[in-house]
Image (cartoon, rainbow, N blue to C red):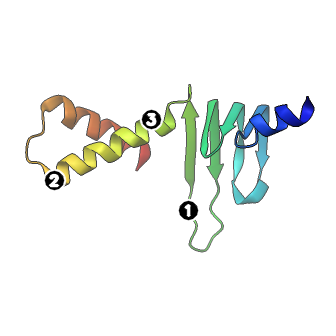
Amino acid sequence: MLKKINWKFRKTHIEISPLNIHINSKWDGWGFEILKIQHNLWEGSILKMVWELPNGAEKKLKFTGDFLFLRSNLLKELMDLEDRILWNSKFSKWDEIKYWTLNLIFK
């Protein structure tokens, strides 16, 4: 019975962490994550706030965050908008507002 269960879930990799506190762990910086879920290559969390602090050489202050598992979806939307800007001349006012807002958040 256990062999069958193991065989059925051999390609499923899920990790759920209720609270992660980063104190310069794996060079990720300082911060926290609440309810981090990682499924295969997708990763999201309800609330994530991580700062990479400057080290005096080339590294500058950098912020990484996530809210309600939206980071990957919003980054995908930003990439789609950038592709539309690159390949298409038609761009509505709503698309300009979305592009400006997402660019402000992620760049």
Mark 1 neighbour density, 10 Å: few (under 14) some (14–19) many (20 or more): few
Q: Quadrant of the N terminus?
A: top right
Q: Secondary structure at mark 2?
A: helix
Specify whether 85 is left or right of 5.
left
Q: Which residue position holds label 2?
A: 87
Q: Earlier in the sequence, mark 3 or mark 2?
A: 3
Q: Earlier in the sequence, mark 1 or mark 3?
A: 1
For the residues labelled 1 and 3, the Cα–Cα distance comes to: 26 Å
Q: x%, y% of residue 81?
A: 26, 43
User: Is residue 72 found left or right of 54 in the rendered image?
Assistant: left
Q: Which mark is residue 3?
A: none
Could you say whether the residue bearing mark 3 is in a helix, strand or loop? helix
The kind of residue on which mark 1 rests is Lys
Q: Nearer the viewer, mark 1 or mark 2?
A: 2
Q: Is residue 36 above or below residue 27?
A: above
Residue on which disc 1 sits: 60
- What amino acid is at disc 2? Trp
The front one of 7 and 92 is 7
Residue 104 found in image quarter: top left
Compute the Cα span from label 3 to label 2. Answer: 21 Å
Residue 58 lies, with reference to residue 4, above or below; the image says: below
Label 2 Cα crowd, 10 Å radius (few <14 / some 14-19 / many 20+): few
Q: Please give the name of the residue rendered at 79% of the width and 39% of the height, measured from the top-left corner.
A: 7
Q: Residue furthest right?
A: 2
Q: Quadrant of residue 105?
A: top left
Q: Which residue is mark 3?
A: 73
Callout 1 touching callout 2 (CB < 8 Å): no
Foreground pick, 35 / 106: 35
State the image coordinates of residue 63 (x, y, percent, origin top left): 56, 47
- Contact between labelled residues 2 and 3, with CB atoms less than 8 Å apart: no
| Location of residue 2 (image quadrant) | top right
